[in-house]
Amino acid sequence: MKTFKLYSISLLEGKDGNVHQKMVPIEDGLIINMENQKQMWYIEAVVSEDYAEFFQRVKEKEEHILVDVVITSKDNHPAAMITSVQSITSLSNSKISVLLEAKLAVKKDDVIEDVLKDLVSRGFSEEALLEEFKTRMENLKAHPQSALGSIYRSIQQSGLYKLQ
């Protein structure tokens, strides 16, 4: 089991055929890789109680939330995860703690592949391709919008999850 600091979390919501990111400001948080056969992760985020109703509704309806998380440092690549709400705990100072059970929806290698496909489709080749690829990988702060749409649609179509 490995534990990391949760740097940021954003909700990925499907609307009108597109996926929109909604940042959830966190006060504190951690993410635990259970390193088990099910490849489960747990995310605990301390957020404003303004989000209590949203998370409670998702929990009661037994829905899933697609999230993008960044761990340890803002410079790390995000990880898209499919989550379910396990518990919501009221804290002092108008905060709540939300515990999410999570599985990786896309691996870093898939993101790299998406960046490369995008560059090739835009006509980059040889040295220009290599330079642009290096630049994009250094500056990658989020999944490309096209990748998020593909991830969201494939999760919806799998029938395994009930996206909110």
Image: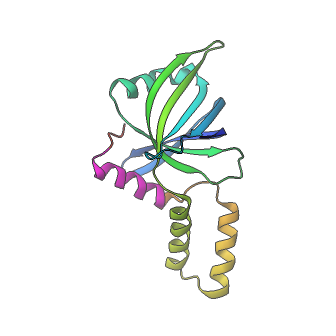
Residue 58's place in the image compared with 10, above or below, is above
Residue 143, located in which quarter of the rendered image?
Answer: bottom right
| Quarter in which the C terminus is drawn | top left
Residue in front for this viewpoint, 21 or 85: 85
Residue 70: % across, % down: 63, 46
Residue 84: % across, % down: 42, 34
Q: Is residue 69 magenta?
A: no
- Residue that extends furthest to the bottom in the rendered view of this protein: 126
Colouring scheme, one of rainbow, by chain, secondary structure, one colour: rainbow
Q: What residue is at 57 percent from the left and 23 percent from the top?
A: 97
Residue 161's place in the image compared with 89, above or below, is below
Residue 116's place in the image compared with 14, above or below, is below
Residue 66, located in which quarter of the rendered image?
Answer: top left
Q: Is residue 47 visible?
A: yes
Count how many numbered circles sit on residues in the image: 0
Residue 139: % across, % down: 69, 61
Q: Looking at the magenta stretch, what is its main secondary structure?
A: helix
| Quarter in which the N terminus is drawn | top right
Q: What residue is at 32 percent from the left and 49 percent from the top?
A: 156
- Residue 139 in the figure: left or right of residue 101: right
Residue 130, located in which quarter of the rendered image?
Answer: bottom right
Residues in magenta, as a range: 147-160
Q: What residue is at 60 percent from the left and 38 percent from the top?
A: 31
Q: Is residue 155 magenta?
A: yes
- Residue that extends furthest to the top in the rendered view of this protein: 92
Residue 99's place in the image compared with 35, above or below, is above
Q: Is residue 17 visible?
A: no
Q: What residue is at 45 percent from the left and 27 percent from the top?
A: 86
